[in-house]
Structures are given as C-alpha cells and as structure tokens.
Amino acid sequence: MSRLEKLRESWMHQAHLADAADPLKWLRAHFHIPEKDGRPVVYFTGNSLGLQPRKAAQYIAEELEAWRTLAVDGHFQGKRPWYHYHTFFSEHLASLLGCQPQECVAMGSLTANLHLLLVSFYRPQGQKFKILCEQNPFPSDLYAFWSQARFHGYDPQEAVVELPHNDMAEEEIAQYIESLGDELAVVVFGGVHYLSGRFFRPGPLVQAAHRVGAFFGLDLAHAIGNIPLTLHDDEVDFACWCSYKYLNSGPGAVGGLYVHEKYGGLRDIPRFEGWWGTRSDTRFLMERSFDPAPGAQAWQLSNAPVFNMAAHLAALELFSQVGIEALRHKSIQLTGFLEQGLDQLNEALPHRSFSLLTPRDPALRGCQLSIIFEDEETGQRVFKTLLSEGVVVDWRQPRVMRMAPVPSYNTFEDVARCLCSLADALVL
Ligand SMILES: *Cc1c(COP(=O)(O)O)cnc(C)c1O
C-alpha cells in the first residue's frame, strides 16, 4: 500500500472513531445539508454563508401567519409580538459575546452598524485622528474607515493605519498601538481576520488602546459563533457583526451591535438616532425629545425586519441549546484534525505545495484554516478538484484556499473527505 493510501485509510478510521464519540453529532440533523450527485457535500464555507437550520422555515411561516391573521395587532399580540421582537435576541447574543443582555442588540447590517458605531466612537480632533486596523482588513471595513476619515475632513491615506503584520505577537501589537500615542483616535480590528483566520484576542489590545486614550472596537463577522468572547470583561468599547456567516441566519440576515455598559443610556454621546432607539414604554407618546432606551438599544433606528429575524432566532436558539463552549471544544478537535492531516499530506508529497497561513496555536484561531499555495495554477487545480468532488471550500486571490469546518454541522468524516480530495488533486 502506498504512503498516501495508508494516510487515506488512517484519516477515515480516525474520523469514524471521532464521529462515534462526538457528543454533538445530533446537531447536524437540525440543518439542511446541500447535496451533490445524491450525496451530502462537505460544506466548509460556513465562514461565508452558514447552512440553513431546519427550524428557520417554521419560524418565518409563523410570522407570515401572524401577519395574515393578526395584521396590525401582531405588533402586540401573538406568540412573539413584533414590537418587542429585538428583545428576544439579547440573551442569546449576550452568551455568545460575553456581555450583558443590555449591551447588545440585533439590528441593521454589519457595515451600516460599523458606520453608526464610528459616529459615536471615531471623534477625531486636531492631531488625534488616526484609525488603526489589522493589516489588509476586509474591504468593506476599509471603505468605512476611509469614508469616515474623509467625512471628518482628514486625508484617508493618512488617517487609516494598518498593522505592519498580522502575525505580530500580542505584546508587539500592544506596543504598536501605544507607539501611535496621542494621534490614535480609535482601534478597530476584525476579531478573526477573514483571510488568515487569525484571532486577535482583545484583552491586552484594549488596555493598550485605552492607555493612549483611544477607543477599541471589533468587527466580529468571523468571530461570533466561532469563538467564545468576553467583550464586557475585556472592556471592548464597541463591536458589530453579521449573522449569515457562523450564525447561520441566512443571506443578508440582520446584524447586530454591542456597546459597553458605560456608554448605555448616555444622552450626550454623538449618535445617529431614530425612533426605535427610544424607551419602549414612552415611544408611542411621540414626544419631541429623544429618551434613549437602555444600553445598545439606543443605537437602533428602525423597527425590526421580522421575517429575516425569524430565521436568526431559530439559528440562535440552537446555539443556546448547545452552548458556545461545547461547540468550541468540538471545533478545536475538528480543526486540529484538519491541521494534522494537512501536515501529513505535505510530508508525504515529494515537494511542498502549500503552507498554513493560519496560526498553529488554537487560542489564536477559530475553526477556519487557510492555506497558501506555492503557485496559483496548482492551487486553482486543487480548488476545482475539491468542488467537483463535493468539497465546498473557497478561493481568495492570489493563492489562498479557506476551509472552515463548523462544529454544528460538520463531521470528522467531512474533514477526512476533504483531506482525501486534496490528496487526489495533489498527486495528479
Ligand atoms: C462578511 C464581512 C463583511 C460584510 O459586510 P456586510 O455589511 O454584512 O455586507 C464586512 N466586514 C467583514 C470583516 C466581513 O467579514
């Protein structure tokens, strides 16, 4: 038996043992898994769009029913009155974010929320005008930072500073933050970097930002539902996220935002406001003064988009049923198995064709592993082979392939199938 055949056998064997021992294996049945050629695909792109929870359709249907039968009364009657709809999310989100329920709210969309938060937390004055982010952030975030700087009359190229490297150690990043000193107005990092999958643990970075009088915020697009967070205790000032990635809430689904307790209920903080940001008990008095709702809810503008939020609720209930800690436990094993297989594959091949872009320390990553190919042609060929064999991964220019085994619906066998397909493609 060739070395690669032995590897294939051992991956499958290990996977079957691990799946049999997995206490969360029941969870997969709560999701719709797409098929290719009559077989469930290996879905490793939950970092782009999570799979549909089976309960989502029922929850949306219930709201259609309420609209059909109650019409305007649905705001205050029925199983989940729409007037209070956003409040049904707070406990679920708080347990994922590590914050108090009042510090977070399901609302808006990620980039829009980032702008709303920057209105409150990017208040450049004179020479204190810089925004620091990680190196090569997600483009939408960069567009938000640039346009905010321009809006305040600054040159975006001068105002927006990127970290020199994303593989800097935490102490080095903290030192870099402090080196910007009085010029630094705000730090906004992607919690998990979308390309490399590196997790920026906020704790030490927040302290560094605060030491130079800067606010600290996070874009949690790739972190929420992936890694347990402790935003409140870390004293993160603000954060936003989307819910269609690891939160499995559907394309373009509602996002959310967090603001630390110390800013909740403030009347004088700069903020773009709307009627849903006022206290719910006095809202319909239609007063001419803005009476802020407690906590993060004061940042809300509009009433809840209920159909889209119904899927979000179905998805979050599953998270609460399982608990993020249990998911993280499986996630570390699942991703560790993939990492080990990738290393074995590289060793078995005559020459190295890819290397890992993601940190090897599980504390510095979520479920995603990114590999970078030595040459683009091989990478493209491997990517296409995987897709043709029903292994759904994604490709980012120039030479990066991202694979995200998600603990809620992926199995160890999925990882073994992915490794076998990689082996097929690379020995060609
Ligand atoms: C996915 C993602 C976005 C997408 O923004 P939307 O406003 O939801 O379209 C933005 N930033 C980061 C870091 C992302 O990963």
Image (cartoon, rainbow, N blue to C red):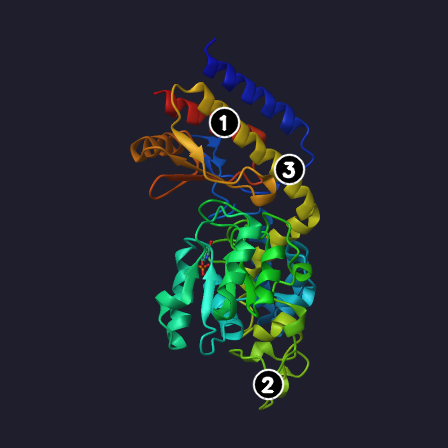
Estimate how packed mark 2 is, as few (under 14), some (14 to 19) or many (20 or more) residues with alpha carbons within 10 Å.
some
Q: Residue at x 64, y 40 (%)?
A: 27
Estimate how packed mark 1 is, as few (under 14), some (14 to 19) or many (20 or more) residues with alpha carbons within 10 Å.
some
Mark 3 lies on a secondary structure that is helix
**Alpha-carbon span between mark 2 and mark 3:** 46 Å
Q: Amino acid at mark 1?
A: Asp
Task: In the rendered view, tell whether residue 313 sits above or below residue 363.
Answer: below
Task: Return the residue at label 3.
Answer: 330
The disc label shown at residue 290, or none: 2
Q: Nearer the viewer, residue 233 or 317?
A: 233
Which quarter is ligand 1 in? bottom left
Whether residue 157 sits left or right of residue 198 in the image: it is left
Mark 3 and mark 1 lie on one chain; the one further toward the N terminus is 3
Task: In the rendered view, tell whether residue 185 sits above or below residue 369.
Answer: below
Mark 2 and mark 3 lie on one chain; the one further toward the N terminus is 2
Q: Quadrant of the C terminus?
A: top left
**Alpha-carbon span between mark 3 and mark 1:** 20 Å
Q: Amino acid at mark 2?
A: Phe
Q: Residue at x 47, y 59 (%)?
A: 133
